[in-house]
Image: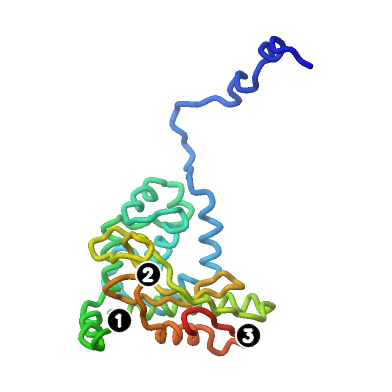
C-alpha cells in the first residue's frame, strides 16, 4: 500500500506545463468555428436543394440581394449550427471562414425576417377563419404560393432520398404533433404547460426523414385538429413510390 505522503508528493498531470502556447498575434488564415457545416452543406447540395428551390420558389423581384436558394441554404445552416432565432445570423456573419466555405455570406436578421414574411398571406388565414364550422377551434389555412413551392422542395428531397435508398422497402409514416416552445405574443398554451406552436409532422420512420408537415391554427395548441390535410400531404409525398407504405398515428 502506498503511503499518504507518497501520494501527496507525486506530481499531478494537472500541474504539468501547458501543452501549447497562445500566440496573441492576429492570425492571417481564414478560420471558422463551424467545421462541421461543410459536410452538411455538401449533403444538401448533392440532393439538389438549391436547384429545387430555383424551380419551385420565385420571390426575388430585384437583381440585388440574395436569391431564394441562398436564403434557404442560410436557414438550413442556421438550424444545423444550433441557431434558434433570427438574431443568431449575426453570429454566423461574424465568422468569415464560414462565408469562405459556403461561397456566400448569410443574410442579416432583418433581411431574413423580410424573406420569411413573403411566405405569409393574411387573406388565407382570414378565409379559413370565416369558413371555420360552428363549434370548431382548429383550422388549416390554405397554403400561400411560396409555401406550396417550399413544400415541393421538401418532396423533391424525399423522392431523391427514396431513389438513392432503393433497398429500403418499407416506408412507415409516423404522424404526430410536435410542440415547439415559443414566447411570441401569438403563441398559444400547450398541453405541456408552456406556450408555443404544435405543427403536425409526418416522419418516414425507417429513414428518420420528415415527409410532410401541417401547421394547424387553433385557439389552444394541443386541442383536436383536422388530420385530413396532413394525410393528403403524406400520400402526395409518397405517391408512385413502390414501397409498402404503413401509416400510423392520429387516425391515418
Rendered location of residue 203, percent (x, y): 52, 74
Disc 3 vs disc 1: Cβ atoms closer than 8 Å? no
Q: How is the image coloured?
A: rainbow
The residue closer to the viewer here, 9 or 138, is 138
Can you give x and y, in whole percent of width and height, for residue 47 in the image?
54, 71
Q: Quadrant of the N terminus?
A: top right
Q: Position of residue 58 (x, y in %)?
A: 34, 77
Q: Mark 3 or mark 1, which is nearer to you?
A: 1
The one of 249 and 217 positioned closer to us in this rendering: 249
Q: Which residue is mark 2?
A: 198
Among numbered discs 2 and 3, the one appearing first in the sequence: 2
* Labels 3 and 1: the sequence-earlier one: 1
Disc 1 crowd rating (10 Å Cα; few below 14, some 14-19, many 20+) is: some
The number of numbered discs placed on residues in the rendered structure image is: 3
- Secondary element at image label 2: loop
- The quadrant where residue 12 appears: top right
Real-space Cα distance between discs 2 and 3? 29 Å
Q: Position of residue 235 (x, y in %)?
A: 50, 87
Q: Residue at x 26, y 60 (%)?
A: 184
Mark 2 neighbour class, 10 Å CA radius: few under 14, some 14 to 19, many 20 or more: many
Q: Quick one: SS at disc 3?
A: loop
Q: Which residue is mark 3?
A: 243
Q: In the drawing, what numbered circle is on residue 221?
A: none
Identify the residue shown where x is 30% and y is 55%: 108
Q: Which residue is mark 1?
A: 139
Counting residues from the start of the chain, the first of labels 1 and 2 encountered is 1
Residue drawn 22% across the image and 77% down it: 122
Nearer to us in this view, 120 or 244: 244
Vertically, is 127 above or below 38? below
Amino acid at each position: 500500500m502506498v503511503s499518504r505522503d507518497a501520494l501527496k508528493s507525486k506530481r499531478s498531470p494537472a500541474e504539468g506545463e501547458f501543452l501549447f502556447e497562445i500566440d496573441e498575434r492576429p492570425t492571417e488564415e481564414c478560420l471558422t468555428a463551424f467545421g462541421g457545416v461543410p459536410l452538411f452543406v455538401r449533403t444538401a447540395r448533392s440532393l439538389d436543394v438549391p436547384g429545387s428551390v430555383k424551380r419551385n420558389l420565385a420571390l426575388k423581384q430585384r437583381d440585388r440581394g440574395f436569391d431564394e436558394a441562398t436564403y434557404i441554404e442560410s436557414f438550413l445552416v442556421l438550424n444545423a449550427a444550433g441557431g434558434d432565432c433570427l438574431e443568431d445570423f449575426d453570429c454566423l456573419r461574424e465568422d468569415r471562414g464560414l462565408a469562405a466555405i459556403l461561397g456566400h455570406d448569410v443574410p442579416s436578421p432583418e433581411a431574413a425576417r423580410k424573406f420569411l414574411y413573403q411566405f405569409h398571406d393574411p387573406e388565407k388565414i382570414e378565409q379559413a377563419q370565416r369558413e371555420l364550422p360552428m363549434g370548431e377551434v382548429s383550422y388549416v389555412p390554405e397554403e400561400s404560393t411560396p409555401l406550396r413551392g417550399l413544400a415541393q422542395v421538401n418532396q423533391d428531397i424525399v423522392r431523391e432520398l427514396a431513389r438513392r435508398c432503393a433497398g429500403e422497402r418499407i416506408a412507415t409514416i409516423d404522424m404526430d404533433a410536435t410542440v415547439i416552445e415559443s414566447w411570441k405574443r401569438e403563441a398559444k398554451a400547450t398541453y405541456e404547460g408552456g406556450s408555443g406552436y404544435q405543427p403536425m409532422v409526418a416522419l418516414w420512420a425507417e429513414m428518420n426523414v420528415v415527409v410532410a408537415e401541417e401547421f394547424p391554427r387553433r385557439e389552444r395548441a394541443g386541442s383536436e385538429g383536422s388530420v385530413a390535410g396532413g394525410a393528403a400531404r403524406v400520400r402526395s409525398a409518397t405517391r408512385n413510390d413502390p414501397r409498402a407504405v404503413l401509416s400510423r398515428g392520429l387516425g391515418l
